Image: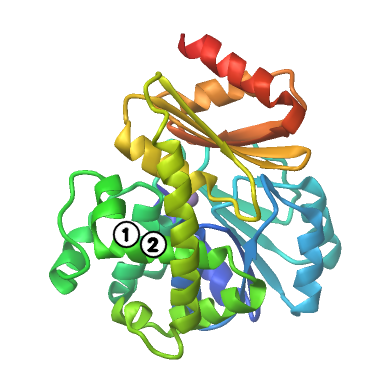
Amino acid sequence: MLTENQLQEIREHLERSQNPIFFFDNDVDGLTSFLLLRRWLGRGKGIAIKSFPELQEHYAKRISELNGDYVFILDKPVVARAFFEETLKMNVPVVWIDHHDVTIDITENVSYYNNVPDNKPVSYICQKIAGRKEDEWLALLGCIGDSFIPEFSSNVEKQYPEYWRKVKTAFEGLYNTRFGEIIMMLNFGLKDKTSNVLKMIRLLLEAKSPNDIIEENSKTSSLRKRFLVIKKKYSKLLEKAMKNTSNKLIYFQYSGDLSLSADLANELYYNFPEKTIVVAYIKGTKTNLSLRGKTARKLTLKAIEGLDASGGGHEEATGARINSNDLPKFIEKIEGMIG
Ligand SMILES: [Mn+2]
């Protein structure tokens, strides 16, 4: 975990900013990390990073467009060197908070904070920075979304027993509680068009409790509609993927307009914790992969060796991006390694 001194340094960065721009990873850990800091500070703008695997240079334009004077990057493992060079030219300080095990290439205006090898989610770190007890439920959403049960989950259980209960694993919380349903709702909401993402962020910035997200009213209706549409697509894909699960490797590929690989891979892994999971989302010449398994990280790094590809992540959960032509070679390598 970051030290109290480091947490205090980050608080001071936040307090010095007049109009901070928060770039956050496009998942529930990234989203809630932003919300926790923004709710504490009371100012700043949030942008979900859609580029994968790295935060790309073109996002630097957003800083001047939005008149930002400080940049915070949350939960994104890789950032293009050119992005930092742009911020250096603009003379804008950058604070980067992450929990992935990666090597970095930064410019002198960047303060980098990483809690590796402890690896607790960035939403956990942000809850420690902001320290608002009334936001623990929000921090819990981010932590469970990133497979971690924080110690304050018992407080949330007392406050919201209809949403959360004691669970043995984070996955159980994700697939068997109402909070799990909200996490999926937010995850799918992030895949919506920008105007709806902004609408969702406004809702979440004001929400005083999970009721404010779940309750059916005019503020929540677009989020709910989106959830129901994607949930249907998702369930169909999952059902297909579950048909072929006899081997040590569960491999599933799909295409279409919506990437749901990480969610599919997680639920497959929850159902088959002893197996290796590979989910491939083929989009034209590029394929995004989500891997799960006890040795996912090792497998991923070995499988992309020698390919024109990028990838990485956590011990048991990784992502990679390869050329679609290389997909058979990639799978063959994985199969070779797990026997
Ligand atoms: Mn994360």
Quick check: marks 1 and 2 in contact, CB under 8 Å? yes
Foreground of the two, 89 or 214: 214
Q: Residue at x 76, y 62 (%)?
A: 59
Residue 322 in picture, x, y percent from top left? 71, 32
Query: Does the rendering let one see residue 150?
Result: no
Q: Is residue 226 visible?
A: yes
Residue 311 relative to residue 188: left or right: right
Query: Closer to the camera, 122 or 307?
Result: 307
> Height in image: 320 above or below 166?
above
Q: Please name the amino acid that badge 2 sits on.
A: Ile
Tell me the amino acid under the disc marked 1.
Gly
Residue 126's quadrant in the figure? bottom left
Q: Could you say which disc has been placed on residue 180 in the image?
A: 1
Q: Which residue is mark 2?
A: 183
Going 51% across and 68% down the picture, which residue do you hit? 189
Q: Residues within 10 Å of mark 1 (few under 14, many from 20)?
A: many
Write the residue at 74% across / 51% down: 108
